[in-house]
């Protein structure tokens, strides 16, 4: 039993009961004698001292509930006193408080959700942007889980073929051409790596796409950060070297979240603090998917090209998106065509266009596609791939079937840790402890 709505005062709060005696326990406190399945009943909730509140009560008989157990939801007024009084009266009557994520854990245990869908519930609760919401809903619907089930079934079929050979090992019977099995394993490995390749995109949608703002001192990097955030987050000063550490904030454009990182100006300095800031700039570039090189539009463009070339030579930016952003456009009469994008951070000119370019580069992911967002799943799929490589090697080198089957079972094990076919208490505790109480 738990309050499933957020803590604090609101118009309505919901108290959930789940378990074989949920209905019986609720009826002891309700003024109605019966609860029809999945019907909302307007009734009174009372304890030994009298009525606590007028409530709406809904009974979900097993297995047709979120947890798969008998379940009752009681909607009361959001008064903190009312909430606690209802909870206390149920506790006094034999209920106990739910642990974090216990309702979803019971849904998993009772087969209402697999483990990847249960984790999608947590993502759905945490979603703050349309892209995050669509991604969580897509995974909760089970498209990702279906892909994993198909992969698992293919692995099971391969394992069955090899283990069938073991049953007839004395007759020296081979039930499948090993070259064909190698091709099947390679196909599975390709699909596994296709899934893993979506992790960077999925993780960026989930946590925000990292964008580093780099450039020389006084180019207007901090001003650009403030303009993108529409907030005076960073100190702006004409003194070079004001920013000596990275400043990280997030903003959302067209449903995509960006983690924008303002960095120290790129120049050689004897100041140890400023030099440390430049080193942290390098770290920000390494971690970012998009780099905004900001320069003063009044400077000679040849100097800008030299600076960009120096960055490309010194920084590992291969595969990253690099944009030249000409700042202080309000100081010139004419914008040269070689400027990738001209802005005035001070006057907030060109900022919407820059955001549009960021969104275009990020790409509106089709969240109906299967996209990997969970680091635990990414690691597990990596282990599946390693096991499959061993399987392919064993098949190519005519390793005995029983040894190849061991590697296949290893692949099945790691795939099962994602969906929950294989799950130990430590893993489950770690996953569900991150849920809120009442979910």
Image (cartoon, helix red, strand yellow):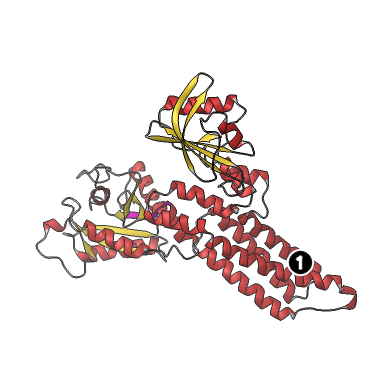
Q: Nearer the viewer, residue 237 or 61?
A: 61
| Viewport quadrant of the N terminus | top right
Q: Residue 300's quadrant in the figure? A: bottom left
> Does 250 sit left or right of 34 as displayed?
left
Position of residue 335 relative to residue 62, above or below, is below
Q: Main secondary structure of the magenta part?
A: strand
Residue 385 lies left or right of residue 345; in this view the side is right
Residue 209 colored magenta?
A: yes
Q: Nearer the viewer, residue 285 or 240?
A: 285
Q: Position of residue 395 (x, y in %)?
A: 74, 74
Q: Which residue is mark 1?
A: 405
Q: Quadrant of residue 234?
A: top left
User: Closest to the observer: 311 or 340?
Assistant: 340
Residue 283 lies, in percent from the top left, at 42, 52
Q: Which residues are magenta?
A: 207-213
Compared to residue 370, the image places residue 161 above or below, namely below
Q: Is residue 262 above or below residue 19?
A: below
Residue 80 falls within the magenta-colored stretch: no
Q: Secondary structure at mark 1?
A: helix
Q: Position of residue 298 (x, y in %)?
A: 16, 59
Q: From this viewpoint, is residue 389 visible?
A: no
Residue 377: x, y in percent? 57, 56
Please identify the quarter of the rendering in which residue 231 is found.
top left
């Amino acid at each position: 039993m738990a309050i499933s709505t957020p803590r604090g005062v609101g118009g309505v709060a919901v108290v959930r009961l789940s378990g074989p005696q949920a209905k019986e326990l609720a009826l002891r406190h309700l003024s109605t004698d019966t609860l029809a399945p999945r019907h909302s009943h307007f009734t009174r909730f009372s304890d030994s001292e009298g009525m606590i509140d007028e409530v709406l009560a809904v009974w979900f008989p097993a297995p047709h509930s979120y947890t798969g157990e008998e379940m009752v939801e009681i909607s009361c007024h959001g008064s903190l006193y009312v909430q606690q009084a209802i909870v206390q009266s149920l506790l006094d009557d034999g209920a106990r408080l739910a642990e974090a994520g216990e309702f979803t854990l019971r849904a998993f245990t009772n087969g209402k959700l697999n483990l990847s869908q249960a984790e999608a519930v947590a993502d759905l609760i945490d979603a703050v942007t349309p892209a995050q919401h669509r991604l969580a809903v897509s995974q909760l619907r089970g498209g990702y889980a279906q892909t994993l089930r198909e992969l698992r079934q293919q692995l099971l079929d391969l394992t069955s073929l090899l283990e069938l050979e073991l049953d007839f090992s004395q007759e020296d019977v081979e039930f499948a051409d090993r070259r064909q099995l190698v091709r099947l394993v390679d196909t599975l490995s390709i699909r596994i790596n296709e899934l893993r390749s979506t992790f960077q995109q999925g993780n960026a949608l989930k946590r925000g796409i990292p964008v580093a703002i780099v450039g020389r001192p006084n180019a207007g990097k901090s001003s650009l950060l403030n303009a993108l955030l529409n907030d005076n987050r960073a100190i702006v000063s004409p003194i070079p070297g004001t920013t000596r550490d990275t400043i990280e904030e997030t903003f959302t454009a067209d449903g995509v979240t960006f983690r924008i990182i303002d960095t120290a100006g790129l120049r050689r300095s004897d100041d140890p603090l400023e030099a440390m800031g430049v080193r942290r700039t390098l770290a920000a570039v390494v971690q970012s998917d998009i780099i905004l090189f900001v320069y003063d539009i009044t400077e000679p463009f040849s100097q800008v090209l030299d600076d960009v070339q120096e960055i490309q030579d010194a920084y590992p930016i291969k595969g990253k998106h690099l944009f030249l952003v000409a700042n202080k456009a309000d100081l010139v009469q004419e914008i040269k065509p070689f400027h990738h994008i001209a802005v005035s951070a001070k006057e907030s000119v060109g900022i919407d266009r820059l955001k549009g370019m960021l969104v275009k580069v990020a790409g509106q992911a089709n969240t109906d596609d299967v996209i990997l967002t969970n680091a635990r799943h990414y690691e597990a799929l990596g282990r599946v791939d390693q096991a499959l490589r061993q399987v392919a090697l064993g098949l190519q080198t005519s390793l005995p079937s029983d040894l190849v089957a061991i590697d296949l079972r290893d692949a099945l094990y790691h795939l099962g840790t994602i969906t929950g076919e294989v799950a130990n208490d430590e893993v489950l505790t770690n996953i569900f402890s991150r849920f809120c109480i009442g979910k």
